[in-house]
Image (cartoon, grey):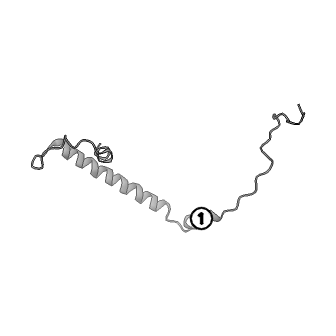
């Protein structure tokens, strides 16, 4: 919830005074830590998955991949001819 509040800029009036501690602030801080830990874990898993010489090479040359030209056209057998066919 803290992420959404920061993103949309709401909830400033519900914050406690700087000297006050609240249970909501403690749970929000714990939620932020959980979110940060989850993000780190996701990034680490992604790095492990991509840590292969073969995958690195495939990603490096992906923009140079050759694809065969399209065959046929956009007409289909069910289409009626505009020039007097069916």
Residue that protrudes farthest toward the top in the picture: 86
Q: Identify which residue, 21 or 42, lies in the foreground.
A: 21
Residue drawn 33% across the image and 47% down it = 7
The spot of residue 66 in percent (x, y) is 70, 62
Residue drawn 41% across the image and 59% down it = 44
Residue that protrudes farthest toward the left in the picture: 19
Residue receiving disc 1: 58
Q: Is residue 83 above or below residue 67?
A: above
Q: Identify which residue, 51 or 86, lies in the foreground.
A: 86
Pick the quarter of the image with the N terminus: top left
How many marks on residues? 1
Q: Is residue 48 above or below residue 8?
A: below
The spot of residue 18 in percent (x, y) is 12, 49
The spot of residue 67 in percent (x, y) is 71, 58
Q: Identify which residue, 13 or 64, lies in the foreground.
A: 13
The spot of residue 54 in percent (x, y) is 58, 66
């Amino acid at each position: 919830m803290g992420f959404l509040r920061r993103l949309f800029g709401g909830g400033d009036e519900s914050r406690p005074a700087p000297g006050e501690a609240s249970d909501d602030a403690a749970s929000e801080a714990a939620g932020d830590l959980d979110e940060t830990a989850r993000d780190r874990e996701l990034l680490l898993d992604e790095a492990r998955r991509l840590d292969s010489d073969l995958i690195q090479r495939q990603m490096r040359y992906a923009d140079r991949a050759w694809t065969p030209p399209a065959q046929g056209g956009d007409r289909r057998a069910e289409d009626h001819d505009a020039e007097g066919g069916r």
